[in-house]
Structure formats: structure tokens, C-alpha cells
Amino acid sequence: MTRPGGTARLVTSRGTHAIAALAQAFASRRLAPLGTPAHAVALVCAEGEEAVAAAAALAATGLDGVIVPAERMGDAVRAVLEAGGCAVQMPGGALAPAPGSAAPAVPGRVRLLTSGTTGVPKLVPHTWESLFTLRRAGVVQPQRWLVTYQAGTYAWFQMVTMALFLAGQDLVLSDDESPAGLLAAAATLGATAISATPTFWRYAGLTATPESLAALAPKQLTLGGERIDAAVLEWLRAQFPNARLTHIYASSEVGAAIVVHDGREGFPAAWLVAADAPPSADAVQLRIEDGILWVRSPHASTALAGWVNTGDRVERRDDRVVIVGRESTAVINVGGMKIAPHAVEDVLLLHPAVAWCRVYARASALVGALVAADVVLRDPAAAGDAEGELARHAAARLPEYAVPRLFRFLGAIPMTGNRKSEVP
Amino acid sequence: MSAVDRTAVRRMMEELLKRQGKSLPSGDAALLRDVGFRSLDFAELALRVEMQTGNALQFETGVLRSIQTVGDVLDFMERVTA
């Protein structure tokens, strides 16, 4: 790996700064007073620029650390950090020491605080080496990346390690972190590449004006963080015909496992290997067992080795493998008949009035579960009898048990801090 | 538990059927199979009644088989929410 933050720059409304210089300033202000910490340190950062500087400083010094954006600090996160043996340093420098029982620091370790989308947040151990999944990417085009992810998450570290360790990759940060604000910053600060979740783009498609979308000129669009469906890929292809469209399947634990550049849903079935295939030192390996995707990755968290059950349910469709949902929530059982939420979501998204939806099980004493849907309409004012309209639309395309019985119409797409859909 | 009166349950049935492009005849005598009110519709209606009262309904085994008419549905909901 090259020297962290060698030439990369951080572009904000306040100007363009070398990340290496920001890291040095951060190290003098926040790390120097710590001396040589005996335990891991959670660095709470007030805003995005400080978080990037903190990451670059950790990478340069090899201190055992966790990056935590200030907006995530609360009792639950504090408890996770304490249980993980961390001292906690607030943006002003105030330090809460590590608990007496804390294990010694592990030099070179960096732990990720997961978003908690699928449960309680947890600390996932990595090294800078395991986080830098693009190290085998070879020569890549210089880009100016809009950072849409919340600081400290796996996807955010992908952006940051790319800037630190690959030549010519600058980062663009927006002061306004709403999707509209982020896209405006992308246009005014000249972002040439955007990495974001499908939910981010759905939200943008709903709220951005045609002018603000036309002001963007991305050469690279990267999707990740959630299930990626054909509809969002098609929308992006139509909106930005000159951009290369890449989608990434990744998780904090297994690392970036699948990178697909052809703009089609899923990944080629030819990438699957047999369960008894010999391990590879540098390639990610994939296989399916009982409909669940298993991954063996050289980018996996240091806590994992060998084949990892991703818990993601997949389907073979001709020459592709498509991820259809999480194992635990992948099917809704309606009186013994099973339906995958994504199959219902795909049908609802076909209706021109629907901007976004999520489908889930609603417990029913009589039949176990009924299908329920949260929906955001493109034009709430023109809703009329939207419930009936969508129920009839679904009934014409799905078996009776799969038709949503309860609809909730939301005023806006609910998003987590990391721009994913919230789980009901 | 707050009871849901027959008029309110009838209105819910009416709306449920309307969403499917069907209508609910007046009176209680109409057979559910003629109206097109099926078992999943009954499950939906029960869930909506539960949401309205804030309480889970208790269903006795076998009682559902005796529900044949619109009036049976209204009687049943009235009884279990009383």
C-alpha cells in the first residue's frame, strides 16, 4: 500500500485540501494528547471532514481506533464501545477512559461500528489491508467521488481507503447531507463519480428536479449497501447514459465480495464455484447452499476465515444469480403459501404512481401473516383511491395471497443515516 | 376492549370489497361465497378490527367454518370485541 493520503484531496464548499495535511492537523490536535494509548480509542467526529482526517491519521499512525460520527453517539453506541474496550474521545478532546477490564490495544486494527440495520450495532474488526478491497484494481481512472455514506461505516471506509491508497481518487463532501443537498454539492463541486444506495437514488429520483439531475455529469455510478433491483439500474442507465454503472455486493463481515460492471441485475452464475473448490489467495469465491449465498473472501473481517454464510437468499435466473433478500425475512408465509417481499415490491414499483415501497409481513392470528406495504407516491396530492388502485394492480399480477392487504402511505422515503431503507 | 359496532364492521367490509372492485349487498343474508368474500378477506377484516380496537382477537377452533353469511361475520366480530 502507498503512503496513506499521499496525494488525495478533500473537496468541500470551504475549498480543496490535501487529506495528508488534514490528517496531520488532526493527529496534532486529537492524537498527540493521547500519547501511546494502552487501549483502543473511539474518535467521535463532529462532521465529515473531521472523520476523513481521523481515518487518515489512524491509517498513518496504526493506532487501534474506531471512527464514530457525533450524531450516532447515544447510550446504545456508548455501551457497544465500552464493551469493546474503547476509550472514547469527544470532538472537543474530552476523554472517557477505557473500562478497567479493557483488553490492550491491537496496533493496526480498525474496527467498524455497523449501522445496526439488522440488529444491535456491533464492532467488526478489520485492518487497513482488509478494508482496502480495491488494492488489486490496478490502474483506475482518476475520479472525484461524492461521499454519500455515513462516516465510520463499511461503505464509507471503501471511499476513504480508495482515496488514501489509490492514486487520483479525491473525495467530495457536502455540508447538507440530504440527498438533494448531496446532489447539489456533486454538481457545484464537480463530482465525477457517485457511490450510493438504491434508496438514495429512489429518493433523489423523487425529490430532485430534472435540472438538478441534468447538472450532474457522472462518469462512474456505483451502487451498494442494499438489494439492487432491475428498476433502479434501468432508471440510472436512462438518466446517465454516459456513466459506467457498477454494483457491489458487500458486507462489513465479508468485505466487497461481488463487483458487477455490466449494469444487469445480479451477477453471472459462471462466478459460482463448488463447495470443495480449493481456496484462492486473491479471489473472492461464491457458492449457493440451500438458496443462501456463501462467500469465501480474502477481504473478510479478521474475525472470520473460510466460507461465510452471508444470510442473503439468492435465486438462479438463467445465466444470473440474483440476491432476493435476507434469510430471516426472505419469505412471508400466508397460511402456508410463501411469497418473497421483493417479488411484491417489484410489482408495486411497476405502477407509475409508486416512487418507493417496502413489503413486509404483518402478523395475523388467522393465517400467520398477511402482506403489508409501505408506499411513497410520486404525487401524494393525486393519490385518490391509491389503496384500491394498487391492490387491483397487484391482484392482476400476483397470486391472491401475495396481494398486499394493508397499505401505509408515507410522506417521504424513510432512510437510515447510511441512506438505506429503514426496516419496519 | 372497545367494541366495534356492526355499522363500523360493515363499512370496513364494504371498503375491503370495493378495493377489489366488488360490492356488499344490503342486509345480512347474502352468502359470503356469492359476495366473493374469501378467507383471506376475513383475515384482513379481523386484522383491521384488531388495529381499530388495539387488541388481539381470540378465535375458537371451528367457529370460522360456521360463518357463511354477511350477518355471521358481523355477529362474530361483535361477539369477539364485546
Image: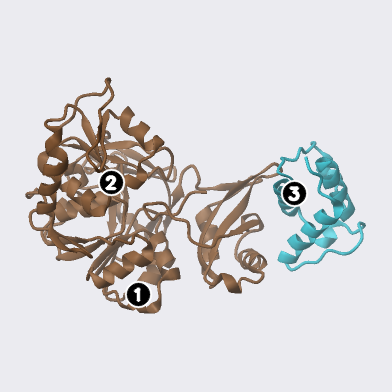
Which residue is under mark 3? Answer: B49
Which residue is under mark 1? Answer: A213
* A187 and A356: which is toward the camera: A187
Using the image, tell me which numbered label, if any, was put on residue A152.
2
Q: Earlier in the sequence, mark 1 or mark 2?
A: 2
Residue in the image at 20% along x and 63% along y? A14
Using the image, tell me which numbered label, if any, was put on residue A85.
none
Residue in the image at 38% along x and 56% along y? A419
Chain A shade: brown
Mark 1 belongs to chain: A
Chain B shade: cyan
Classify mark 1: helix, strand or loop. helix
Residue in the image at 31% along x and 49% along y? A250
Mark 3 belongs to chain: B
**The quarter of the displayed image where residue A305 is located:** top left
Q: Is residue A176 left or right of residue B53?
A: left
Q: Position of residue A81 (x, y in %)?
A: 31, 33
Asked if residue B19 is positioned above or below residue A238 in the image, the reply reads above
Mark 2 belongs to chain: A
Marks 1 and 2, Cα distance to the nearest angstrom?
28 Å
**What amino acid is found at the position of numbered circle 3 in the picture?**
Val
* A171 and A198: which is toward the camera: A171
Disc 2 residue crowd, few under 14, some 14–19, many 20+, Cα 10 Å? many
Q: Position of residue A128 (x, y in %)?
A: 17, 43
Residue in the image at 32% along x and 29% along y? A82
Q: Is residue A218 visible?
A: no
Q: Is residue A100 left or right of residue A375?
A: left
